[in-house]
Image (cartoon, coloured by chain):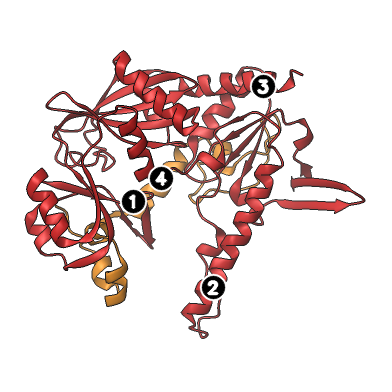
Chain colours: A red, B orange
Amino acid sequence: MILILSQSALESTTEEVMDWLEALGGRCVRLNGDDIEGRAALRFEVADGEASLGFAAGGFELPLAEVGAVWFRRWLYERRHERVDLLEPTAGNHTLHHELRRHLSLESRRLSDFIYSRFDHLPWLSHPRRSSLNKLDVLQRAARAGLATPATLVTTEREALRRFCAERGTVITKPIGEVDAFVEGEVSHFLFTTALGLAEIDSLPERFAPSLFQEMVDKVYELRVFYLAGEFHAMAIFSQNDEQTRVDFRQYNRQRPNRNVPYRLAPELAARLRALMDDLGLETGSIDLMVARDGREVFLEINPVGQFGMVSRPCNYQLERKVAELLLRKEDDGKRP
Amino acid sequence: MEKDPEGLFARLSPEGQELSPVIYRHLHPRVTRATVLRMAESRPYRATGYVCGSFRKPISRCLGPDEPR
């Protein structure tokens, strides 16, 4: 049986793979990160030298003893305490509220880490320890692997940014860490990659919080590559013909979507990407690149738990099936002495 | 460059603005509902979660409404 660690929201990929596992004759059990926050009954006991971990919902106990391999898809989209007021409105103590939330987050993380560790002896596809990469570290490693990377600056100084922009032309800014959205009722405020020219830079204060800037690559098209167990499944995204998607294709134009086509990586590029994935200890991940007008294939970043349906469907790669087959092979491997 | 017409950055305190990276000045507002409803494209049992592949029982619910069965 395959244990799938996932999240209940915004995660259709998990269901597609589960369908394939079922169709291929496998069995799976799914545990969402949000289930351990009160949606399912959780029990961990240590007694008489024996330890046991269990989850149950609706009177059904998850058969954890039968698990032969683990797929870490995702875990917690958000923790419950991050969305609720923990203090009565009249309390109005922001510092106390922050401390309560911080402590609950630590408690939740400790519990998650323990749950992962209970399956350390099994084969995994993706692992939480490698699910969140440091963008800056990955860029360094990519450059070492011989990949073209965009000129990058992290700074707090307007003048340094101004000089960078004068040398490189228009620059883009994006988060150092994760892309996120701040939900405010009916409106979500998204952190999309944004282009900045000298005029915008001049309007900044002399000093600002640490921010990431990169040269804006004059791209012809973008590449989204799904890597799985040594194989690349690539798709070209023609995002340049649409003003809405030109800087960040995730600003989807749903009325007139970008054209997406299957793409074969050059062997040299594939070898360098494979070296990078090996260096990062990743068996799977979604890799973003751009093909520049000057022919450079510029590496941008890797998401170890990125969505792959957006590559699988337009290119007919059946990636969900490939993931399911790999999980079943891992389960078989785990049974061997 | 798209500005943030909802003005989230403008609503931050002076200290909040000082602590925010430059990208916070260029947040892109979208209607939240559009994001949440994408989940309802899943089949109903998907939207309510699984316990296991052969024994389906909702143990968690997604944020959006389920599709009608």
Q: How many marks?
A: 4
The image shows residue B37 at horizontal and vertical percentages of 42, 46
Of pointers 1 and 4, the one earlier in the residue sequence: 4
- Kindly give the residue lying farthest to the right in the view shown: A48
Q: Amino acid at mark 4?
A: Asn
Instruction: Identify residue type, mark 1.
Output: Ile
Pointer 3 and pointer 2 on the same chain:
yes
Per the image, the residue denoted by label 4 is A134
Q: Is residue A208 visible?
A: yes
Residue B59: x and y, percent? 65, 46
Q: Is residue A251 above or below residue A106?
A: above
Return the residue at label 3.
A26
Label 2, label 4: how far apart the Cα atoms are: 26 Å
What is the CA distance from the residue labelled 2 to the residue labelled 1? 25 Å
Badge 2 amino acid: Glu
> Would you say the residues marked 4 and 3 are in contact, meaning their CB atoms lie under 8 Å apart?
no
Three-letter code, disc 3: Gly
**Residues packed near mark 4 inside 10 Å, few (<14), some (14 to 19) or many (20 plus):** some
The residue wearing badge 2 is: A99
The subunit letter for the residue under badge 1 reads: A
- Where residue A208 appears, x then y in whole percent? 24, 65
Give me the residue at 72% from left, 42% from top. Answer: A118
Chain bearing mark 2: A
Q: Secondary structure at mark 2?
A: helix
